[in-house]
Amino acid sequence: MNAWFQDNARDLPWRRLGFGAWGVLVSEFMLQQTPVNRVIPRLAEWLERWPSPGDLAAVPPGEAVRAWATLGYPRRALWLHAAAVEITERHGGVVPSDVDALLALSGIGDYTARAVAAFAYGLRHPVVDTNTRRVIARAVAGQAEPAPPSRTRDLEAMSALLPLPVRDAAVFNAGMMELGALVCTAKNPHCGDCPIQTACAWRRAGYPAYAGPRKAVQRKFEGSDRQVRGLIMAELRATHHPVTDTEITVLWPDPVQRDRALAGLLADGLAVTTAPGRYTLPHE
């Protein structure tokens, strides 16, 4: 696996020597549910503007939301800003390497904490993402798809495969992700190019269809509350003055859904009321 990764890994910014723990942390926030090709240019802009946690912590959270632009799920921007404040105040502006310390930061879960510890600091921790889970399901369990996520089960499965040498473990984590992203894809996997094809339990079993439990499918974006929230957020990002109820009214024809989306943004802290019927990004 490691030899295959060294020969086939994509040249991604966060894999380059000297990229730094802050850059890795920002990239992990951005990569959640967002394709790599959309993240790369936004990440470069972000790190040029805020090259350290202290730089981001020094601006209002609304600026982070504005800079997040069209990456989607803008609550990630608020969480990242809060994490930057916490890193600055608790850790002297240095992203911690300890998994428990990382987990104590806003918006950071098991995957992100372990990814930062492994990829930024080279520590030996199992790192499990969607691609890794699919590779393990096929190669080890002989299933076409992974079962719904389970923290304990997923970490134990990856831990059992992780090489003992610390340096090899970090490479193996990245290699499993890359294998799932490039070869062992969800649809039309390239089994003939797979470096572990002879050991793959799913291949040996004749590629049986998956019959187990599945993760709930997300609703379509078109016409959803997420789309309406996105339209309102785009309006808020486009200006530095308050957006009025009248301006929001023209964004979506369904008043019930529109009001629900606005109420959700206010509840999530992505928008604030400056006066009755007037809204801005937080703390601007």
Image (cartoon, grey):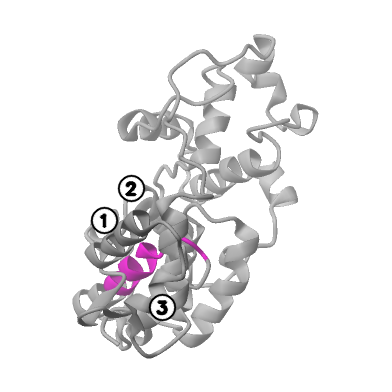
Q: Amino acid at mark 1?
A: Leu
**Is residue 102 shown to the viewer in this render?**
yes
Q: Nearer the viewer, mark 2 or mark 3?
A: 3
Q: Secondary structure at mark 2?
A: helix
Tell me if residue 77 is in the magenta stretch: yes
The residue lying toward the viewer, choosing from 41 and 88, is: 41
Which residue does the numbered mark 3 point to in the structure image? 247
Looking at the rendering, the stretch of residues picked out in magenta corresponds to 71-83
The alpha-carbon separation of the residues under discs 2 and 3 comes to 40 Å
Left or right? Give the position of 6 relative to 226.
Answer: right
Q: Secondary structure at mark 1?
A: helix
Q: Which quarter of the image is occupied by the N terminus?
A: top right
The residue lying toward the viewer, choosing from 51 and 144, is: 144
Numbered circle sitting on residue 213: none
Which residue does the numbered mark 2 point to in the structure image? 110
Which residue does the numbered mark 1 point to in the structure image? 103
